[in-house]
Each structure stands twice: as C-alpha cells, then as structure tokens.
Image (cartoon, helix red, strand yellow):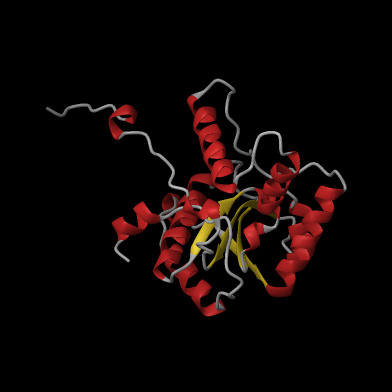
Amino acid sequence: MDLIEAIKKRKSIRDFRKDPVPRAVIREILEIACRAPSAMNSQPWEFTVIANDALEAMRRACMEKLASGATPHSEHSVVGWPKDSVYRRRQVELAKELFRLMDIRREEADKRRQWTERGFRFFNAPAVIVICVDRMLAEGTPIFDTGCVTQTICLAALHYGLGTCIEDQAVMFPEVLRQHCGIPATKQIVMAVAIGYPNWDFPANRIETAREPVEALTTWCGFD
C-alpha cells in the first residue's frame, strides 16, 4: 500500500475477526516499526506480544478486575481534556458518532458499560502488542519516541491487511500484564496496540473521523 494512502486510511479498529495473526507477520511489522525515529537513536521501545491462551487469560483477569470494582489506572499520565476545551469537544463528537453507529442511547447504561468493557477485552483482537520503556529513563522523556514507533506499527500493519487500535485501556491494569506476561518492574508499561484482521461488519469500524483544516492549526512565517 502506498504510504500516503496508508496514512489516510488508517483508523482505529474496534472489533476483529478470530483469525490468528502469524508470529512471522507481527515480527516483520515490528522490524519495520523499529525504523521509526527516536531521540539520538536511543530506540527506547520494548515490545511484549500476547496472543492465544495468554491473551484469553488476560481478558478474563481484566474482566474480573472490572467486576470487582477495581479502579483502572496507568503507569503514566493518561489522556485528559479540560471540560470546556476544543479537545474535549472532539472527544465527545467521536463518542456520539460511535454510539450512533452502535445504536447505544444515553440512557442505556448496560450498553454503555458493555462498550467500555470492549477496550479491556482488547476489542476481541487475536493479538496485542504492549509497548514498554526502561524506568531508568526520565519520566516522559521517551513518550515522543514511543508515539513514533506506535504509529509506524499501525501503518505497517495495513500492508499485511491488518487493522489496529491504539488503546490505553489495555494497560490500565498493569498488574495483570505483569502477572501474565512477566513484564519486570524495571519496565514502565506505556501503551498497547490491538492488532488483527478487521471485522468490517462491525458497525463502529465504519466510522470516519473528522480532522481540523490545516489552516486552522498552522501559523506560516516567512512565506509569501
């Protein structure tokens, strides 16, 4: 797939077919993604790839945590938007469109809860890539670099007919990840990417998110 086409076509996939993704394919994607830029070639990213029985065990453990009333938490600053900001408005617009596609009404608490649970089940993906960094690095220092490698994973996946969803819900019970995947305490769990073959019959996968016009975001200096 052409690079520009891939950038324009990439979207968050929120349901996947059950078909497994071959280990060799994920390995190739990670090899490509590791060409992503990083500060002074520091390459701070590390990956844990989870599938099959290990992933099913994690799904069950996350659901048990939610059912117990445990509060989801993260090992890094999670996304947050001031209430009256344009960022919050964009997030609300996305949620409204997703709920419209899924036929979830504001008053339908059970459906809203089930939607939230999807993220903690990794959107039924057959594999999940967890991205970590070493705790010896200063807090926040490698976040830009991990963002670069994460997007490169998502773009490379399209070449293989795969879809992805970058999701922080997947890492909001870090103790579950550490227990089932052996991630040591010396590593900070940053983000996860659900990966698999998209289920295009799933309504939410039809979403087309809007983007702000470049002129609204750009200040030009020194141009005619």
The residue sitting at 52% across, 72% down in the picture is 26
Residue 62: % across, % down: 78, 55
**Image point 52% across, 59% down: which residue?**
164
- Residue 63 versus residue 107 in the image, above or below: below
Residue 83 in the image, given as x and y percentages of width and height: 59, 23
Q: Nearer the viewer, residue 73 or 117?
A: 117
Residue for point 48% across, 67% down: 162
Residue 70, horizontal then vertical, whole percent: 83, 44
Residue at figure coordinates x 80%, y 41% from the top left: 71
Res 45 visible = yes
Instruction: State whether residue 42 appears in this view.
Output: no
Q: Can you say which quadrant of the picture contains the N terminus?
A: bottom left
Left or right of 139 in this view: 180: right
Farthest top residue?
84
Q: Quadrant of residue 77?
A: top right
Asked if 90 appears above or below 128 in the picture, the reply is: above
37 relative to 118 in the view: left or right? left
**Is 47 on the left or on the right of 200, as rendered?**
right
* 176 or 109, nearer to the observer: 109
Which x, y percent locates residue 78?
Answer: 63, 39
Considering every residue shown, the one lying at the far left of the view is 224
